[in-house]
Image (cartoon, rainbow, N blue to C red):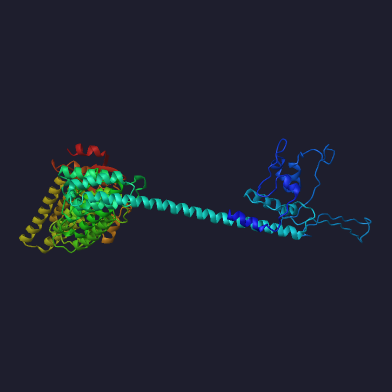
């Protein structure tokens, strides 16, 4: 009402009203006209014409004029209204050139005479919309302003002043209306707050009265009764959760310690959890509630402070997370990973001494919680330890013992967990395969007698290949050929030649012979343990026997046995061997390679392999052309034949100049 009065006072300078306007309903305290029309309200249905022709059109329609009919009682007047043009809003006189007529006296006259007739409309101020907007808000607009809006003779100054007065009034009304709404909203908020505070105060007094009933009667049973009443009667009280936790805190630790083995304590905690469910809203439970948080804190203290095995810890965690005592199991499980499992794993990792063996419980945790950041930390620690171990491996006196004590257990557990570790985003190979190969090649390169004295490194190679699957078949064969057996054969040849040339004593010969026998015995034992290695062991045993026989006979033209080679070299440099061990290294054809290996074999390799399998001995013919003529001898019957291998064809006969081709599968019967 204050707002209405303010607006009315603003227009108090115009008190007189036109009688005709009063008759059609524009008197004081009337917001809109009230005279009924004979059929339809043409004013309401002709807003466009009202906007176009002014308030006069509005008055005519309310007095009975119908669109499309002539003026006057007998409708004999004009039908269409006189057209007028209004300037755009805010545009002054002279802003629009309405009509310009340009004529010339003659088409051939270049001195054009121009006659212009210019008509201007009055500046346009949308008074009608401003008046209608005020009236819709319940404001009585003085008749004087309506007359100015309707008159064709209103001056520009009157139109401008009227429009400004109306828009200012409308802005003021909107401002006041906004302030009123703001004040009303504040009043409603304060009222609601006062009501809530009053209700809270009333509930607080009731809670105090309830607690006073049990003052001096504290017990586990009475606490359960109080919790039940509180959660039924005061579930909406703002501080009910804090009151609940305060009441149970005195007994919670004791109940927790016995709940796993004692049914009464377990049932009491379950009942309390049920009461707590009445005061929590699961739909909005995005954070762990205070009850679950309290239980998890007790659980964390038990698991981290007490020494349990992994299986026991898993049993404890499963018991509580799956029990009805935990209210929000999903959130509790997430919090358990962060606050219990991760610190537990970190504790195990930090306190673990890898040199004394690996605690398998760590891998139990890795299996259960693969995504934990401590898994990556642990793998990094393993890798660093293994890198250091393989470096130290090169300097050890007892290679095998150091490998078993310091490396094998860690490596074995990592290999067993390979599939699990593959699911973890780590950027390194946990087995340090490259470091393994480098270390082994270096140890073999400096080993004095890898098959006689330093046999431990051969055991390491075999263990890595067949027990841990760290080395593949290609890598195993390359290491054995070029780092173990080829050097052994050549060292044996050198020792035998030295003994033969110098006429060494019988003891020296017996020493070399005994060492040779020990190596042969070792290879036979490994052949039985690892049948996969039998062909290569047998081949090198036969090669060693042949070398022993050749040097012992000491006949002119006799040469050493041909060993597997790479690009013509039997003894390779460390860098070359490491390059061959690379998984991406291409394997080139090797005429003298062993057929069972992945190195490409020739027909000569096939013949040699056939002879090994059929108790036939293939040796170079000491009287024939080098690398062209051989002697094949049946070791059982003693029968032998000369042979040559030409263009993948085997030629045999009693003499070099009388050879004939033969199928390889007939060679056995031929020498039977």
> Is residue 244 visible in the rendered structure shown here?
yes
How many numbered marks does the figure carry? 0
- Residue lying at 23% horizontally and 55% vertically, measured from the top left: 345
Q: Nearer the viewer, residue 529 or 445?
A: 529
Query: Residue 637: horizontal and vertical position, in percent?
Result: 13, 40
Query: Residue 2: horizontal and vertical position, in percent?
Result: 58, 55
- Residue lying at 84% horizontally and 55% vertically, measured from the top left: 100
Name the image quarter holding the C terminus. top left
> Is residue 441 visible in the rendered structure shown here?
no
Relative to 204, is 615 on the left or the right? Answer: left
Relative to 235, is 194 on the left or the right? Answer: right
Q: Nearer the viewer, residue 565 or 361?
A: 361
Q: Residue furthest top?
A: 39
Q: Nearer the viewer, residue 400 or 164?
A: 164
Query: Residue 611: horizontal and vertical position, in percent?
Result: 20, 43
Residue 354 occupies quadrant: bottom left
Q: Nearer the viewer, residue 263 or 632?
A: 263
Query: Residue 32: horizontal and vertical position, in percent?
Result: 67, 46
């Amino acid at each position: 009402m204050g707002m209405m009065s303010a607006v009315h006072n603003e227009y108090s300078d115009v008190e007189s009203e036109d009688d005709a306007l009063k008759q059609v309903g524009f008197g004081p305290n009337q917001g809109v006209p009230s005279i009924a029309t004979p059929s339809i309200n043409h004013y309401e249905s002709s807003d466009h014409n009202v906007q176009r022709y002014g308030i006069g059109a509005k008055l005519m329609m309310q007095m009975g004029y119908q669109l499309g009919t002539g003026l006057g009682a007998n409708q004999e007047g004009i039908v269409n209204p006189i057209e007028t043009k209004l300037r755009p809003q805010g545009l002054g006189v002279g802003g629009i050139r309405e009509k310009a007529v340009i004529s010339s006296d003659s088409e051939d006259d270049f001195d054009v005479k121009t006659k212009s007739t210019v008509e201007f409309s009055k500046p346009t101020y949308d008074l009608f919309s401003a008046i209608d907007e005020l009236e819709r808000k319940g404001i009585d607009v003085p008749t004087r302003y309506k007359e100015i809006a309707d008159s064709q003779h209103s001056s520009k100054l009157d139109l401008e002043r009227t429009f400004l007065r109306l828009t200012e009034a409308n802005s003021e009304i909107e401002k006041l209306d906004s302030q009123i709404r703001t004040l009303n909203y504040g009043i409603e908020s304060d009222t609601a707050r006062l009501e809530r505070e009053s209700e809270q105060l009333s509930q607080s007094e009731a809670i105090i009265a309830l607690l006073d009933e049990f003052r001096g009667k504290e017990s586990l049973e009475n606490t359960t009764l109080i919790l039940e009443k509180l959660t039924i009667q005061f579930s909406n009280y703002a501080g009910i959760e804090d009151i609940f936790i305060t009441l149970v805190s005195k007994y919670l630790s004791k109940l927790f310690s016995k709940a796993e083995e004692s049914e009464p304590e377990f049932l009491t905690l379950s009942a309390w959890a049920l009461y707590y469910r009445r005061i929590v809203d699961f739909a909005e439970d995005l954070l762990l509630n205070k009850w679950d948080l309290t239980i998890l804190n007790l659980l964390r203290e038990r698991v981290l402070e007490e020494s349990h095995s992994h299986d026991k810890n898993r049993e404890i965690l499963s018991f509580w997370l799956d029990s009805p005592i935990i209210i929000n199991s999903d959130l509790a499980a997430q919090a358990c990973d962060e606050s219990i499992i991760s610190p537990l794993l970190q504790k195990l990792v930090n306190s673990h001494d890898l040199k004394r063996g690996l605690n398998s419980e760590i891998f139990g945790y890795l299996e259960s919680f693969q995504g934990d950041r401590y898994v990556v930390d642990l793998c990094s620690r393993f890798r660093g330890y293994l890198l250091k171990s393989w470096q130290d491996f090169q300097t050890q006196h007892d290679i095998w013992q150091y490998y078993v004590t310091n490396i094998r257990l860690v490596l074995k557990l990592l290999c067993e967990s390979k599939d699990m570790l593959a699911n973890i985003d780590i950027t390194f190979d946990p087995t340090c395969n490259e470091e393994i190969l480098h270390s082994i090649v270096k140890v073999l390169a400096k080993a004095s007698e890898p098959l006689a004295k330093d046999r431990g490194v051969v055991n390491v190679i075999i263990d890595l290949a067949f027990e841990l699957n760290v080395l593949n078949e290609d890598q195993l064969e390359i290491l054995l050929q070029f780092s173990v057996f080829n050097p052994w054969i050549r060292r044996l040849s050198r020792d035998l030649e030295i003994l033969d040339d110098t006429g060494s004593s019988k003891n020296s010969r017996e020493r070399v012979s005994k060492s040779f026998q020990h190596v042969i015995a070792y290879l036979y034992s490994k052949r039985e343990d690892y049948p996969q290695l039998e062909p290569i062991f047998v081949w090198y045993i036969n090669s060693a026997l042949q070398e022993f026989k050749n040097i012992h006979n000491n006949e002119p033209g006799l040469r050493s046995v041909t060993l597997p080679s790479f690009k013509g070299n039997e003894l390779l440099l460390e860098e070359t061997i490491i390059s061959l061990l690379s998984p991406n290294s291409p394997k080139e054809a090797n005429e003298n390679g062993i057929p069972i290996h992945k190195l490409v074999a020739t027909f000569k390799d096939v013949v040699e392999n056939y002879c090994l399998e059929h108790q036939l001995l293939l040796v170079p013919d000491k009287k024939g052309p080098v690398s062209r003529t051989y002697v094949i001898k049946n070791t059982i019957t003693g029968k032998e034949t000369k042979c040559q291998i030409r263009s993948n064809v085997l030629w045999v006969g009693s003499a070099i100049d009388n050879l004939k081709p033969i199928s390889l599968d007939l060679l056995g019967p031929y020498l039977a």
